[in-house]
Amino acid sequence: MRLNHQMKIILPCVLWGLAGCSGSQFGAGNPISGTKSKKNKESTPAGPTDTLQEGTDRPDGVAVPGDDVVNDPAAEDPSKNIYVVNGSTCIKPFTLPSAVESLKVKYNWVAEGPVADFNQVMSTPVISLVEGMDAPLIVVSAFKGTSYLEGGYIYGIHGKDGKQKFVADKAARAMAPSSPAIAKIKLKTRIYYFGLDSYLYALSTSGAVLWKSNQLAAEPGLLMVQGGPQVVDLRNGKGPVVLAPKGAFDPLTGERRFELKDARDFPVIAADTDLQGSLEIVTSESILNADGSSKCAFGEKLTSIAAAQLQSDHSYQTIVGVRAYENRGKFAGYRGDTCARVFESGFENVELNKISGGPVNIGPLFGPGTLGISFAGKNNYIGLLNSGLRWTANTDDDSSQTGGSLFDLNGDGRVEVVYNDHDNLYVLDGNSGRTIYQTANSSGTLFEYPIIADADNDGKGDIIVGANNAQPYASGPRTGVVVFQSQANDFLPARPIWHQHGFNPLLIADDGSIEAERLPAFEQKSFNVGYRNNIGFSKNLSACP
C-alpha cells in the first residue's frame, strides 16, 4: 500500500522526522489510495558486478528451542541438516517442487458476533500455546472495510480448527495496523496491544482487559505504529518488560518503568548487541542500555530494524535496517557495540522506499554456515549475503513496507522466504528467489507479514497470514486469517510459537515463556539462527532411512 501523505495523522513527517514537512500537509484524505502497479512475478539473480562476501563455517551444536534437538556434527551427513534427537530419532530433507505449486487452505477464520464486520486483517498474526487449550491460540487485530486508521478489535482464534475464541472488550479499540504480542509470564499467558488512544493494553486469553498502561505508549494522535509491542526479559535482574515507543512497561501492572527518549514511533526491539549476556534496546536512532540510558547512537534514522550475529567470529551483533537517503533508501548495517556503520548498500535497479523498508529477515538463506538477509523493496523482494545483492523477486507492492518470514520447510539447511503482496502469498527459494509456491491471497499491505508455526498441534509447519479486500489495492475473496499448508501437508515440524512482530526465536520458549531462566541454553548461540526465522522442533520426527 502507498501511504497517503494527506492523512490526518502524524505521518510521515513527525513519525519519521523528515525535513521539509509542515502542518499544512495533514489534511483529511482517503486512507487507501494510489495507482496499483502490476508486474510479472519472477526472480532475478544478482549480476557479476555485485559485491559478495564469504560467510563463515557453521559452529557445532546449534541447539533448537524447546527440545533436546542438536545439529550433531558427528551425524552421518550434517550438511543435509540431519537432526539427532536423544541419540536416535532424526529427519532427512525432502525435495521441494521444481515447478510452481499452489498451497492448500487448511482453514479461513472470519469474524463472528456483534462486530463481525470488523473482519479485515492487515497486521501480523501472533500465536502461542496457552493454558487450557489443546492447540495454540492465534491472536490478531482486525478492522472494518477500508478504515484501518479508525481502529479495530483484537480476536482470539483456536489454532486447531479456526474457531473464534473471543473478541476483546469493545471499549478498548486497537491500532488495527499494529500487531499484538503474546507471552507467558509467571506461568500465565497475556496478550498486549496498542490502543487507538496510544496507551498499552493487556488482555487475558479470554479477551478480558487486565489493565491499561498508566502512561502513553505511543505519540498521542498517532493512528499506527510499525510492528507492535515487544515482550522481552532484558536480563538485568528486574524481570520482563513490554517495550513500546514511549517506554518500557511492567507486563503485570502496566506501569511504565522507564522512558525511551528517542524511540519515536518506529519499532523497538531487544538484542544482545555486544554479546555480553544482557540485552540492549534498539530503536530507530540508537542502542540503549537495559535501563533506558544511552549506549550509542547511529547518527541517522533507520526503519525495520533487525539484529543478529552475522559472522561467528564477530564480537557483536549487527543491527541492520533501511535508512533515508535522497529520494530512495539505502540498506545499512551497524556494529552492536559501538553503533559504527559497517556497510551500506544501494542497488542498481532495486528501489527502496526512503521513509520505510519492509521488516528484515535474517537466516541461513544460502545454506548452513552463513546468515543471509532478505526484505521487501519497492515491487521487489531482495536476498542479500551480508551487503551483497544475490537475487531479487518481482512483487506487487510499491510501498516496500510489508515483510516476510523464514523457515526451513524441507530440512535442507536453507530457509525459504514466505511473503504476501497485494495479490498473492509466495514461498521463495532462499538461495535464488525462485517461486516455489504461489497462491492468491490479497492485502492492501502495511507492515504485516505471514508467519510459520504449528497452528493445529499436528507436528507440521503451517503458514498463517492475514487477508483483506481493502480496495483499491486488494480485491480478493478472503478476509480474516488464513492457515495454509502444502498439498501433501509435508512441511517439517515447526514450533507452536511466533509471539510478536519483532520475532527473535532465541528469546521465547515453545510454551510462550519469556523469562530468561525458563529458556534453554540455546540463546547463547545466536549465529546461524537469525531474526524472524522460526526453527523446527522434535515433535513427530521420522526415523532416518
Image (spheres, rainbow, N blue to C red):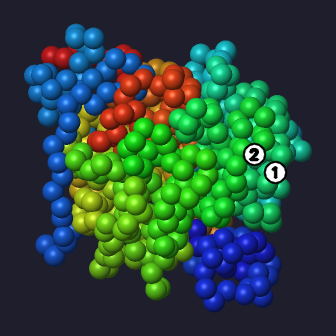
Q: Does 461 sit left or right of 310 as displayed?
A: right
Give the label on residue 256, or none. Answer: 2
**Which image quadrant: the C terminus?**
top left
Of the image marks 1 and 2, the number of the one nearer the N terminus: 1
Q: Does 347 sit left or right of 237 as displayed?
A: left
**Which image quadrant: the N terminus?**
bottom right
Residues 420 and 486: in front is 420
Examine the rendering and report whether any part of residue 293 can be seen: yes
Name the residue: 14% across, 34% down: 79
Whole-percent x, y for residue 333 in the image: 36, 64
Give the label on residue 215, or none. Answer: 1
- Asked which secondary structure carries label 1, the reply is strand
Asked if disc 1 and disc 2 are in contact, CB closer than 8 Å, the reply is: yes
Q: Quadrant of residue 492?
A: top left
Residue type at the position of mark 1: Gln
Q: Does 237 sit left or right of 82 as displayed?
A: right
Dot 1: few (<14), some (14–19), or many (≥20) neighbours within 10 Å?
some
